[in-house]
Image (tube, grey):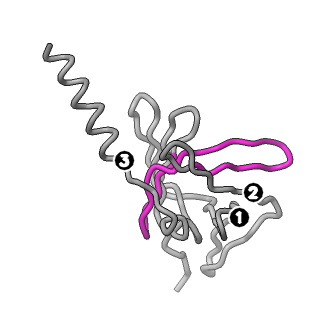
Amino acid sequence: MKNIFGILLFLFLTVSCQQKIVATDINKLNGYWEIEKVVLPDNDNKDYKINETIDFFEINNNIGFRHKVTPQFNGKYLVNEFAENVKIVQNQDKTYLEYSTKFAKWKDELISISDDKLVVKNDANIEYHYKKPIPFSVK
């Protein structure tokens, strides 16, 4: 009986602690994001101290793109020519980022977002925790 109560309590806390994403939150996606850590399905964490690439999102009216960019020593970013199309989709009280290129399609669930933190989860149940990057410059 204690096990059932414990499981129910865990499920309740898991569901109730998830952020409800509203339309105004989507604008917070715009800009630069770098991976801070990855949480694997077995709850093992992989921390990222330095990122060679950073994600740049530009979303307008739930449609936009994501570019992988490389930080430069002068504080600017080097942009490659490959953009991933992004579409924001609401489905059963969840928000998804649907990506597409001419080679593949996939989606991530938007778990939480604030001005400086972003968490998404992919179909393999891997969570990606992002933070706003601090621009690098040589002084």
> Secondary structure beneath disc 1?
strand
Question: In x, y percent, where is residue 105?
Answer: 75, 42
The residue closer to the viewer here, 18 or 47, is 18
Q: Give the range drawn in magenta.
A: 96-120
* Residue at image location 69% in from the left, 42% down from the top: 106
The Cα–Cα distance between marks 2 and 3, rounded to whole angstroms, is 26 Å
Rendered position, 24 above or below 14: below
Crowding near the residue tagged with mark 2, few <14, some 14–19, many ≥20 C-alpha atoms within 10 Å:
many
Q: Mark 2 belongs to which amino acid? A: Asn
Question: In x, y percent, where is residue 14?
Answer: 32, 38
Check if mark 2's residue and mark 1's residue have beta carbons within 8 Å.
yes
Q: Could you tell which of marks 2 and 1 lies nearer the N-terminus?
A: 1
The residue closer to the viewer here, 85 or 8, is 8
In the rendered image, residue 36 lying in the magenta stretch gets the answer no
Residue marked by disc 1? 64
> Secondary structure beneath disc 3?
loop
Q: Mark 3 belongs to which amino acid? A: Gln
Q: Mark 1 belongs to which amino acid? A: Gly
Which numbered marker is on residue 23?
Answer: none
Residue marked by disc 2? 85
Question: In x, y percent, where is residue 7?
Answer: 25, 23
Decide if residue 94 is on the left or right side of residue 107.
Answer: left
* Residue at image location 67% in from the left, 73% down from the top: 77
**Outermost residue toward the top?**
1
* Residue at image location 54% in from the left, 75% down from the top: 136
Residue marked by disc 3? 18
> Secondary structure beneath disc 2?
strand
Q: Could you tell which of marks 2 and 3 lies nearer the N-terminus?
A: 3
Crowding near the residue tagged with mark 3, few <14, some 14–19, many ≥20 C-alpha atoms within 10 Å:
few
Rendered position, 139 above or below 43: below
